[in-house]
Image (cartoon, grey):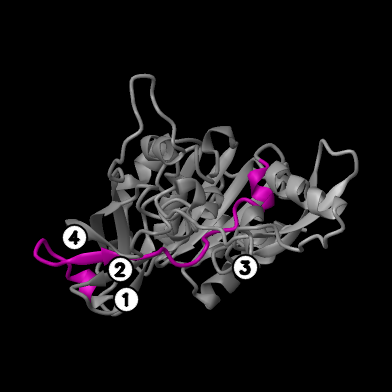
Amino acid sequence: MLGYKLRGCVSRGARDQSQGKKLPSVCPGARGRRSSTRRAPGLGRSTVVTVRAGPVEIDEDDLIQGKDRYKWYEAKFCAEDQPAWNIGSFVSNVQVSPLYRAVTMSVEVSRERIPLAAAYKAAGQRAVLRVNNGLERHCAAATPPFPEEINNEPLFKVRGDLFAQEIKAVREPISVKAHLTVLVTRKEAPEVWGLGPDDVVEVGPFAGTGLDLRNSPLMAIYACPTVVIFVEGRGIATCRALLESSSDVANLNLGFRRDVRVYYKVPNGASVVFKEEFAAWEARGPVRVFTTTASFQDAFDDDDTLTYDPETTGAIILVGGDEEAEKEAREVCKDADINRILADSVEQAPVVVWYLCWLLEGYN
């Protein structure tokens, strides 16, 4: 029970009590209220009276009393209230082989508009596209994950930071555009295959989690300085994304490797995709690209320039889900005693953020 100064009420009650009268249980003017006990100071003897507290009235215009005030302090992910699909714009559509086309679009990548869970974060993820409100198509992304530096301004803004000359004000989310190239066939995505300037293309959350590069022993650049990459089919899209990745996303750190060999298997010479970019890849580090129309084993055996130690060599298999091709590449690794293998058939585990678990399950 709480003690309060009720001089008027208590003095009369004490006076009545001294005259032999029964002390009222309710102080005048306090009937109909919740009962509580209050102690009056200043009297020779402690006197306790019972009063009733009235209902609490909330002023809805007072933000301090607002019913949703607790939401001010909730941890939130940026862009969680943004739409899942965003409109892209056509850039180009190029036939890069008899089977494949490289379709490039300008897409939204701002962290104020695209939540992290839906963003393109790792090589090997698949772009989810919808053309003219048609079916969803999962396409191999041939563009490296978008570098973090292009989101410096949006990330600065979502933190609520201000420059010295700024004042707090409502501002529209910042838009950041970047080019996204996907590799498609007519059979798997006919709408994307035929994409043109007059079509409306929508980009949804990227599918999959990509190559498990972060948890792979291949990330130890000095313990694994030599890397051999076996590529076939649409796996060349992931290979391009991996080799061109910037330093602020998961990448191979080509500048610190001793040897990186790419063995690219194709049905014939006309089927080589991104051939005009091989020279640029080789300029990024100790990279050499070999194409073969035979087998991975023949390409590996014919490479007389490769000197490797199985203990310090890793392999990456990028075959776009082709089980036979992956099996063939693993046989080459087995014969070469290469045990550190990363394949695109096994994606990385979803990242579990500790505060997400806290929000869902409660902090213990």
The residue carrying pointer 4 sits among few (fewer than 14), some (14 to 19) or many (20 or more) residues within 10 Å by Cα, namely some
Q: Is 161 positioned to the left or the right of 252 in the image? A: left
Helix, strand or loop at label 2? It is strand
Q: Residue at x 54, y 50 (%)?
A: 303
Q: Is 1 positioned to the left or the right of 172 in the image? A: right
Percent x, y for residue 185?
29, 72
Percent x, y for residue 162?
40, 28
Q: Is 192 positioned to the left or the right of 196 in the image? A: right
Q: Give the CA distance from mark 2 to mark 3.
A: 65 Å
Q: Nearer the viewer, residue 224 or 179?
A: 179
Residue indicated by mark 4? 93
- The label on residue 32 is 3
Residues tagged 2 and 1 counted as in contact (Cβ below 8 A): yes
Q: Give the CA distance from mark 1 to mark 4.
A: 19 Å
Residue type at the position of mark 2: Leu
Helix, strand or loop at label 3? It is loop
Seen as rendered, the residue at the extreme top is 164
Closer to viewer: mark 1 or mark 4 = 1
Range drawn in magenta: 191-220
Residue type at the position of mark 1: Glu
Residue indicated by mark 2? 129
Please tell me which of labels 2 and 3 falls first in the chain: 3
Please tell me which of labels 3 and 4 falls first in the chain: 3
Q: Give the CA distance from mark 2 to mark 1.
A: 6 Å
Please tell me which of labels 4 and 2 falls first in the chain: 4
